[in-house]
Amino acid sequence: MERIADPARANRLARAILSDVMLYNADKVRAGIEADDVFERLRPELEEARAFYEERVEPDVAKRTNAWGRALVDVLVYRSRWVRSRIW
Amino acid sequence: MRDPGSLDHYELLDVARDASPEEIERAYRIASATWAEGSLATYSLFGDEEVGALRERIEHAFRVLSDADARAAYDSGLAPAEASEPRDADELPFDLDIDLSPEAPEPRAEALPALAGFEESFEEEGVPYDGQRLRRNRLQRGVELDQIARVTKISPTNLRFIEDENFEMLPAGVYVRGFVTAYARALGLDPARVAPDYMERLEEARVESARQGSGRRARR
């Protein structure tokens, strides 16, 4: 399988994967945002998701763009902004 | 295409003639949710009048089949030949506003990102299209489930049921075929390859589920 070398595509992949993580773990994400421990609470799911991402993206692109990190914030955190939390 | 008026109550709810009250209620709940007012599930594929008429028919079918006396009276009026008439799985019971045939152009493909120039190297030659493969294809294209929902007007819930192969919760096969065809087209996959593979899995699972249901009833 050819790995993704285009940063824009890597970014979309990261967002799509994390969108699924949210979809499949909605209650857990909400609880994690409320308690401000979302990354800890979702550690196994996020590790699995990141492995899926890294398998498909050129290592150099993954490292250089930090698409994963940005998608974590954009998708997992920003889309939970309606949840009451001391984060905000 | 078959007119909905020609479907009997059992066909409309997609249950067998000997379905138990529980099976009828479950089928009714699924049909009602699928066609509920405001539901995204194929809603925009049909005119308001068609959907309204279908909802009324579903309600009526359930009222009859959930009442033992009314059901017996209804059954006695059904022609035996009609009882064994198979439904054509390739047909949707309504005329769609959009053309989902494999030969149709693909106006939606441009609405999704990451499709242009997407390498076929992600294709898994010889592997049947199941829910997992559909999901992998979607993720590899960087497409979120909500994006598919917006493009196809199929509810995210039903899309997730398709990917998870949650066949129990999906509506009748004729509708699922339409969902899967639209899903495949939205992703730039060949619906003529995807839909038969997926429908075969769905039909096998439902036959097995029906067989187990009959076994349970026989043991009672």
Image (spheres, rainbow, N blue to C red):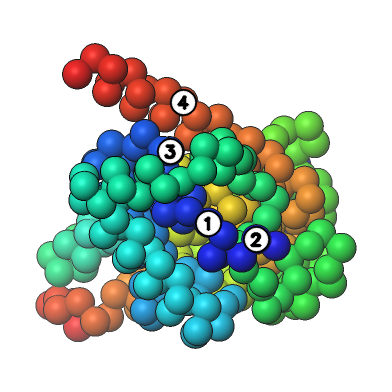
Percent x, y for residue B69? 21, 47
Percent x, y for residue B131? 56, 44
| Residue type at tag 1 | Leu
Residue A21 higher or lower than A75, as above or below: above
Disc 3: which chain?
B
The answer to whether mark 1 and mark 2 are in CB contact below 8 A is yes
Q: CA distance from mark 4 to mark 2?
A: 27 Å
Q: Can you say which quadrant of the picture contains the N terminus of chain B? A: bottom right
Disc 2: which chain?
B
Q: CA distance from mark 1 to mark 4?
A: 24 Å
Question: As rendered, which of B90 and B62 lies closer to the eye?
Answer: B62
Disc 1: which chain?
B
Q: Which residue is mark 3?
A: B16
Question: As rendered, which of B39 and B31 lies closer to the eye?
Answer: B31
Q: Earlier in the sequence, mark 1 or mark 2?
A: 2
| Residue type at tag 2 | Arg
The secondary structure type at the circle numbered 2 is loop
